[in-house]
Amino acid sequence: MQRRISLIPQPQQLTAADGDLDLSLLSAIAAAPELQPLAWLLSDLLGRGTGLRLPVVQSTASDPVDGRVLRLALAGDRPEDFTTAAEAYRLDITPDGVELTAAHPAGIARGISTLRQLLPADALREAPAADPVVPLVRIADEPRLRWRGVMLDVVRHFQPKDFVLKMIDRAWLHRLNVVHLHLTDDQGWRFEVPTRPKLTETGSWRAETKVGHARDEAAGYEPTPHGGFFSVSDLREIASYARERHIMIVPEVNLPGHARAVLAAYPELGAGQNKPVCPTFGVFEEVLEPTQAALDFALEAYTAIAEVFDGPFIHIGGDEVPMTQWESSPVARELMEREGMEDVRGVQAWFTRAFCDHLAKMGKRVIGWDEILDGGAPAEAAVQVWRTQDYVAKALEAGHEVLVSPQSHVYFDHYESDDPNEPLRIHGLTPIEKVASWDPAPAGIDETRILGVQCQLWSEYLPNPRDVEYAAFPRLSVFAEVAWTNPDVREAEPVLDRLPVHLERLHAMGIGYRPLEGAKPW
Ligand code: TNX
């Protein structure tokens, strides 16, 4: 009997034949030498959910393996890293075996995700619960956009390392390729910098989280002490876990604003009075003073994080930087005079340029929130647009590449409906249908300058992994389709029709998603 094939994201080309292949009839996973790590990972995942133990053997095209196998092969000219071509793959499942072919290992990693979705949903469990059977299909696939990301805010509420690893896995299953970690903000500094111990001794902890609104008290939010951080070894583990799955981690060190945690630890770097790590949420006026000491600090923090994460991008933040402290700071005034700046926003631009120059020397590219445009930023910096669509045009005009992530469509910390049963959210309304109908690069935009798209999970009102999951899923699944699948293919079979089958996968993985029929009391 032929099962209905419901994949998310929908592959660009899929042809199904009648019948299934039982993977237990195969003798091995045969993989090119460079694909051995992915082959072992696949063998492990298959084994966990189905009990099948396929050995991994080494093979190249000139050294074929006899019998029926699950073959992972590299073919064709190798595309550059971080291109859509690098993530293209072909997956052929016939009665003779499985062939997964790509020109780059990243494409094999994406094809493995599709193969996992072709298994019964119960094969995604942690112990054997399904037969290793897949339908006969021929798939040729390649993403629409280069950058398909999800941002985790581990600052407003710290999210433990195990949860970060889980989210990397979930991103992988949805063929996303970026996990952006928001690591520093007013409410905490969340990673170890060995040369600056007070960042984690002082800056990672807040005495209490004050409820922000009267409604928060009604919802049961109690003022509680809160904190946590990732050690260098934690970061290394996250980095290699992501690397194995060909997921790029983009770490964000948000400066020169959102700096209350830095300044609680090192008040001498600030332009105002000493204050503790911030116990409330919002935008605060504390910023770094534009001194050599503050710049040295920032560059040290960027060096530390850039040494751990080997991806090409470092996020410098740069959002919501109030100018009030600089307006009244003699040091900032002197800088403005010296550099001939007419506008105080030039002070932020001064920081941005220094960050870009420093990171370029380390072989990294900078990305920042769209506020870096306000005072001007070097054209080689990429811009993550979150405010309005106008900033997409503005950034493109100024020569930047753009990551599209508008709060109007892909902020999953927003409400999902206006039902009073919805759990407390920061504000906003982003129902899943709105995500499903989103076109991130409408006609008229030069798509070659669009890096891609990213959804955000700000955690002011998502205090633990369970809340993050409920906010993220299944909106993230639908987002992944928007990011990967071409609009004409999306229209042919609407993603919302495929979602019920996909929810069985989320359930099998233990994800506490929000039910489609509406919020349940939480
Ligand atoms: C705006 S988006 C912020 C964050 C908040 C978020 C809440 C952005 C660059 N800044 O600091 O957490 O709204 O939705």
Image (cartoon, rainbow, N blue to C red):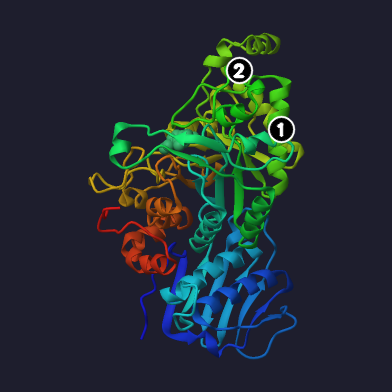
* 168, above or below 205, in the image: below
In the rendering, which numbered label is found on residue 448? none
* 518, above or below 49, in the image: above
In this orientation, which residue lies closer to the viewer: 62 or 289?
Answer: 289
| Residue density around tag 2, few if under 14, some if 14–19, many if 20 or more, within 10 Å | many
The kind of secondary structure element at disc 2 is: loop
**Residue at the (62%, 21%) spot, across then down:** 270
* 461, above or below 9, in the image: above
Q: Is residue 503 left or right of residue 124?
A: left
Q: Which amino acid is tagged 1?
A: Leu
Q: Position of residue 307 (x, y in %)?
A: 73, 45
Q: Position of residue 407 (x, y in %)?
A: 41, 39
Total marks drawn? 2
Q: Which residue is mark 1?
A: 299
| Residue density around tag 1, few if under 14, some if 14–19, many if 20 or more, within 10 Å | some
Q: Which amino acid is tagged 2?
A: Ala
In this orientation, which residue lies closer to the viewer: 122 or 274?
Answer: 274
Of all residues, the one furthest to the right in this rendering is 361
The kind of secondary structure element at disc 1 is: helix
* 352, above or below 237, in the image: above
Q: Is residue 14 left or right of residue 269?
A: left
Q: Which sits earlier in the primary sequence, circle 2 or circle 1?
A: 2
Image-quarter location of ligand 1: top left
Q: Position of residue 174 (x, y in %)?
A: 48, 61
In this orientation, which residue lies closer to the viewer: 145 or 230?
Answer: 230
Q: Is residue 195 left or right of residue 473?
A: right
Q: Quadrant of the N terminus?
A: bottom left
Disc 2 to disc 1, C-alpha distance: 18 Å
Q: Under 8 Å from ligand 1: the CB of mark 2?
A: no
Q: Which residue is mark 2?
A: 271
